Amino acid sequence: MTPDQFIEKKFCAGDGITSVYWVKEGRPDKPALFFIHGLGGNSTAWKGVIRSLANNDLTMLCIDLRCHGLSDMPSSGKYYGIDKIADDINGVIEKENIRSYIPVAHSFGGVCVLTALLNGGGGAAGAVLCNTPYKNPYRHSPNFFVKRSAPLLKVLLRAAAAGGVMRRKKYPYPDYYALRHLSETGLWLHDISAAPLRAFFNNYLLMFSLDFDEKELASLPHDFLLFTSDDPFVAKESLYDLSKILKTWKIVEIKGCDHETIIRNSGDVAAELDLFIAYILKKQNGSCV
């Protein structure tokens, strides 16, 4: 992710894993935007949304999550975990000394954001979740075959993660926004080519540990903007259920789109995000009840 005005930085977690992120400085009196990609992807997925935003005077951050993109991809499974990624998110906010921010996350990135907020991540003025599951998407899939095969899939992923090769080479860094014309399968093939197999399968295994406590989610004080679509992976019914649990400002359904809303409909996402930012700013200024 190297658009104009973004500066590359690095965050080193307590366990020694380094994550690469980018910052564009903006007005300190407004909340920053922290863009967080989904499973198997990288920060380039947000290019279209960032370019389409009217609120371009804000501080903006993008990150390649640990075990993704340009960030470290360790071989040991002990370095993989939703809590670890959530700690990285909170760590970057603390390192940058950002007092107010809005995380904007896609899919698995939203899972990590919810975990970061539940783990005490301070300063969030609101949050945006795009196609984000709050339950194991395999076990709760609307697809009967996927639901019934979930236990077998978990066993296969675990075996693949244990036996996957960690070759010491430079992996490609796909520009997902430029690849937005590809099918879900085409994008998935880029995911799998952009990381060691062990890292790829270890990341996918994390989804099987997903199952938020609804009461804990309901306790979050933040306003949420949610996006859903005709998603074969994260059912829209799940997002509507989540909207009833969280303090949801608005849920937006993008019809005719699959899981990849942020690259295929970046203009629509940016337009709704601009409205949400305006709402948060009014609320912070005491002019919105």
Image (tube, helix red, strand yellow):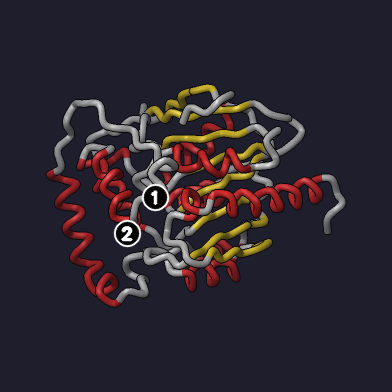
**Residue at left 58%, top 45%?**
103
Q: Is residue 12 left or right of residue 196?
A: right
Residue, disc 2: 208
| Amino acid identity at mark 2 | Phe
Badge 2 element = helix
Of badges 2 and 1, the one in the foreground is 1
The answer to whether one can see residue 115 in this image is: no
Residue 212 to residue 274: above or below: below
Residue 131 can be seen, yes or no: yes
> How many other residues sit within 10 Å of disc 1, few (<14), some (14-19) or many (≥20)?
few
Q: Position of residue 249 (x, y in %)?
A: 68, 61
* Residue 122, image quadrant: top right
Nearer to the camera, 245 or 238: 238
Residue sitting at 48 percent across and 59 percent down?
Answer: 131
Q: Position of residue 199 (x, y in %)?
A: 26, 41
Q: Nearer the viewer, residue 122 or 257?
A: 257
The structure residue drawn at horizontal position 26% and vertical position 38%, both measured from the top left corner, is 195
Within the image, what quadrant is residue 99 found in?
A: top right
Q: Amino acid at mark 1?
A: His
- Quarter assignment of residue 55: top right
- Marks 2 and 1, Cα distance to the nearest angstrom? 29 Å
> Does label 2 or label 1 sit earlier along the sequence?
1
Q: Residue furthest front?
A: 181
- The residue depicted at 43 percent of the width and 26 percent of the height is 12
The image's mark for residue 181 is 1
Residue 84, above or below 255: above
Q: Image check: 24 left or right of 107?
A: right
Percent across and percent down for residue 26 are 68, 29
Between 266 and 238, the residue placed more toward the observer is: 266
Numbered disc 1: secondary structure: loop
